[in-house]
Image (cartoon, coloured by chain):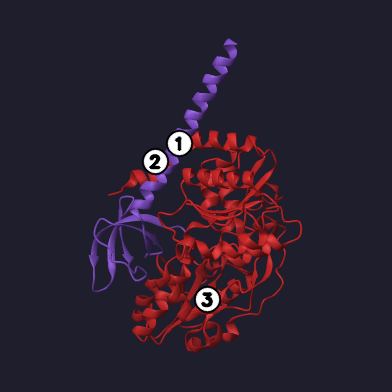
Chain colours: A red, B purple
């Protein structure tokens, strides 16, 4: 039987992290070139910044933070859709807490709630079932956000709604997919990413094999990592070993939760209800082909984008807020390089999306580094 | 957003496919609808937004930690060997 020792304590033990630091330093002696490692999961960003792992690795080894936060990449017109849906009469908009403070064109969901809109935050998507059952005279719209990690939970909710024949529960689907975004970053001319720490919980669902085509095409090392400091340091060690040998392959230091095939049951549920969108606009980045999910046409009756089409504006160019979220989300700039960081833009008054979500890179630097 | 926390199953209601789990000392519920294999009380699962997304593989958890510890031990031995060599070199 395992316990907290194997799952947390030993993986946070300072003496083990420092030992791994020495191994990394020694490996780097054989390499001696700048290394830029991109992570594409907000959870990894937080572990790196919280534990100061970026200050433990050699100076020439840099962590760059990619688009690892699904709330941060959601474009304004999708948030405006949530605001319009929430403002409809006899309607309850249900979503997860991360969404509340994200600024749309006019306001945020939090501000809309203050004006009387019925906007409810749930712990789990499945909580939308009882809200729909208790309010049969209301339309309940579940505003679904998240990467591959969270899409199966929305699919599970849809399955339950179907089984219970709930006539008043609708879905606005904003699930985005990580591999197309990684490919877009790698294909951008001048991309300086040398390796990836791949997202652990996306991989629990997708399996590690999903990254093989990217590694083959772009020949960059990629290591799937857990979320404890020792996991991340071990993943950096794996990356440096690959770079030293000139190798590029998928490795997995998170095998306690990630298999090559992933969670097949979750994948089948996603396939039943969702299909890739031809294209989707990522905030600050632009349009990426096949990078998001939508409900299959056969479930159009449940689709808020069809049922309440008048509430869902078309993609539009973003109004500038003076921040550099796009450059931060693609790893070209660090949060502290933004002129608004910790000045006009703070977690209580966020200008850009990277400061809004707890998992945004700017929020992490604000929380742990603003005095440095 | 993708936060998922290792949690230990404390009870299971097979009829509703719901479990009660202990997440770092906090008791909460988790839906088991995405888990294909049979899970039992005492098993560890990763819980994300109220749903168990996978069972944590105990053997892999132990082996990963053992591997990290082995890497660290090998490095310390390497270091001791180098220190030994430099002591020998100093004597020359």
Q: Identify the disc placed on residue A16.
A: 1
Q: Which residue is mark 2?
A: A10
Camera-side mark, 1 or 3? 1
Q: Are marks 1 and 2 in contact (CB under 8 Å)?
A: yes
Residue A354: which quarter of the image?
bottom right
Q: Are marks 1 and 2 on the same chain?
A: yes
Q: Identify the disc placed on residue A58.
A: none
Q: Are marks 3 and 2 on the same chain?
A: yes
Question: How far across and how far down the image is residue A173, in percent?
Answer: 52, 76
Q: Is residue A283 above or below residue A38?
A: below
Camera-side mark, 3 or 2? 2
Q: Earlier in the sequence, mark 1 or mark 2?
A: 2
Label 2 CA crowd tier, 10 Å (few <14, some 14–19, many 20+): some
Badge 3: chain ID: A
Q: Residue furthest front?
A: B92
Question: How far across and how far down the image is residue A258, in percent?
Answer: 44, 59
Residue A346 seen from this side:
no
Question: How far across and how far down the image is residue A303, in percent?
Answer: 51, 84
Q: Residue at coordinates 61% horizontally, 54% vertically from top-left?
A: A248
Q: Residue at coordinates 39% horizontally, 55% vertically from top-left?
A: B5
| Local secondary structure at mark 3 | strand
Q: Which residue is mark 3?
A: A173
Front-lying residue, A68 or A98: A68
Marks 1 and 2, how far apart in space? 8 Å
């Amino acid at each position: 039987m395992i316990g907290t020792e194997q799952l947390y304590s030993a993986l946070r033990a300072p003496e083990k992290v420092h030992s791994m630091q020495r191994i990394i330093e020694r490996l780097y002696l054989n390499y001696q070139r700048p290394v830029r490692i991109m992570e594409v999961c907000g959870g990894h960003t937080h572990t790196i910044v919280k534990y100061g792992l970026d200050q433990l690795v050699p100076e020439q080894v840099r962590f760059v933070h990619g688009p690892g936060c699904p709330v941060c990449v959601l474009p304004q017109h999708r948030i405006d859709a949530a605001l319009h849906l929430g403002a409809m009469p006899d309607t309850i908009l249900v979503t997860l807490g991360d969404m509340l403070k994200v600024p749309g064109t006019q306001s945020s969901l939090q501000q809309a709630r203050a004006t009387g809109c019925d906007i409810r935050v749930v712990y789990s998507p499945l909580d939308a079932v009882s809200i729909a059952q208790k309010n049969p005279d209301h339309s309940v719209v579940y505003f679904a956000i998240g990467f591959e990690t969270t899409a199966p939970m929305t699919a599970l909710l849809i399955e339950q709604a179907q089984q219970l024949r709930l006539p008043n529960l609708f879905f606005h689907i904003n699930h985005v997919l990580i591999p197309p975004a990684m490919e877009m970053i790698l294909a951008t001319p001048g991309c300086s990413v040398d390796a990836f720490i791949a997202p652990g919980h996306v991989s629990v669902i997708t399996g590690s094999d999903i990254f093989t085509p990217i590694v083959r095409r772009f020949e960059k090392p990629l290591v799937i990592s857990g979320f404890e400091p020792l996991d991340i340091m071990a993943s950096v060690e794996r990356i440096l070993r690959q770079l030293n040998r000139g190798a590029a392959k998928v490795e997995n230091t998170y095998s306690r939760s990630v298999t090559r095939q992933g969670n097949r049951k979750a994948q089948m549920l996603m396939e039943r209800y969702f299909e890739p969108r031809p294209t989707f606009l990522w905030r600050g980045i632009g349009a990426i082909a096949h990078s998001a999910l939508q409900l299959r046409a056969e479930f159009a009756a449940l689709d808020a984008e069809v049922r309440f089409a008048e509430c869902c504006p078309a993609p539009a160019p973003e109004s500038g807020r003076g921040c550099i979220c796009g450059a931060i989300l693609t790893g070209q700039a660090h949060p502290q390089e933004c002129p608004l960081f910790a000045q006009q833009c703070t977690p209580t008054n966020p200008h850009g999306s990277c400061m809004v979500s707890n998992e945004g890179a700017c929020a992490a630097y604000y929380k742990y580094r603003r005095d440095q | 957003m993708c936060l998922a926390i290792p949690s230990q199953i404390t009870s299971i209601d097979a009829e509703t496919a719901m479990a009660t789990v202990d997440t770092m000392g906090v008791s909460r519920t988790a839906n088991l609808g995405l888990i294909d294999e049979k899970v039992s009380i005492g098993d560890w699962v990763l819980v994300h937004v109220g749903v168990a997304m996978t069972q944590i593989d105990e053997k892999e958890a132990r082996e990963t930690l053992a591997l990290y510890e082995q890497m660290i031990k090998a490095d310390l031995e390497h270091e001791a060997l180098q220190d030994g060599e430099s002591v020998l070199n100093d004597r020359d």
